[in-house]
Amino acid sequence: MKYEKFIEEAGLNSADFRWAFAFCNDGEHITEPELADELANLVLSGKKTATASALADYAEANEPLPTVDGKFDILLNGKGEPVAALTNTRVYQTKFNEVTAEHAFKEGEGNRTLAYWRQVHEEFFRELGLFSPDMAIICEEYKVLYKKEH
């Protein structure tokens, strides 16, 4: 397994490994390394404890929806290196225009306001051709089980 050494180092069970990903990239296929690094660093610093994605993106990619099931994901940096193991603590669906200020704050980006969250996420979802104010959003909250020391 590609991440066996990291999983062992983290003291986690490989049977509980779900997948590896870099934020704002397609799973392990990294096309936005600077953004992946920026968001991974927010997780490592403890500022980012949540994320949001478009429901339509899961259907398009034929991927299962995230769940709270005790399994863990491996967060990758912009070079595709594992930097943390995360587990979901809460997953829920809402509409873009109903995402809360609390969720925006937990995402840890920019000035952590809802206005900032809406601005950057609208731009991101527009680039993907998915945006509408009432689009379905999957919100995830997670905790860090392990982070790699640099």
Image (cartoon, rainbow, N blue to C red):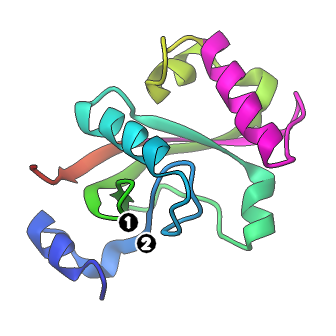
Q: Is residue 149 above or below residue 27?
A: above
- Image coordinates of residue 136 in percent, x first then y, are 80, 41
Q: SS for tag 2?
A: strand
Proximity of marks 1 and 2: CB atoms separated by less than 8 Å: yes
Give the side of residue 132 with respect to residue 94, left or right: right
Q: Is residue 2 above or below residue 89?
A: below
Residue 115: in magenta span: yes
- Image coordinates of residue 71 in percent, x first then y, are 38, 65
Instruction: Please name the residue that numbered disc 1 is placed on.
Output: 71
- Image coordinates of residue 29 in percent, x first then y, are 53, 68
Instruction: Please name the residue that numbered disc 2 is placed on.
Output: 18
Is residue 124 at least partly visible in the picture? yes
- The answer to which image quadrant residue 100 occupies is top right
Pick whichever, 49 or 148, lies toward us. Answer: 148
Q: Is residue 120 above or below residue 61?
A: above
Residue flagged by tag 1: what amino acid is it? Answer: Lys
Residue flagged by tag 2: what amino acid is it? Answer: Arg
Q: SS for tag 1?
A: loop
Residue at screen point 76% across, 51% down: 55
Q: CA distance from mark 1 to mark 2?
A: 6 Å
Give the side of residue 110 with respect to residue 26, left or right: left
**Range covered by the magenta-colored residues:** 114-141
- Image coordinates of residue 44 in percent, x first then y, are 25, 39
How packed is label 2: few (under 14 Cα within 10 Å), some, or many (20 or more)? few
Is residue 89 at least partly visible in the picture? no
How packed is label 1: few (under 14 Cα within 10 Å), some, or many (20 or more)? some
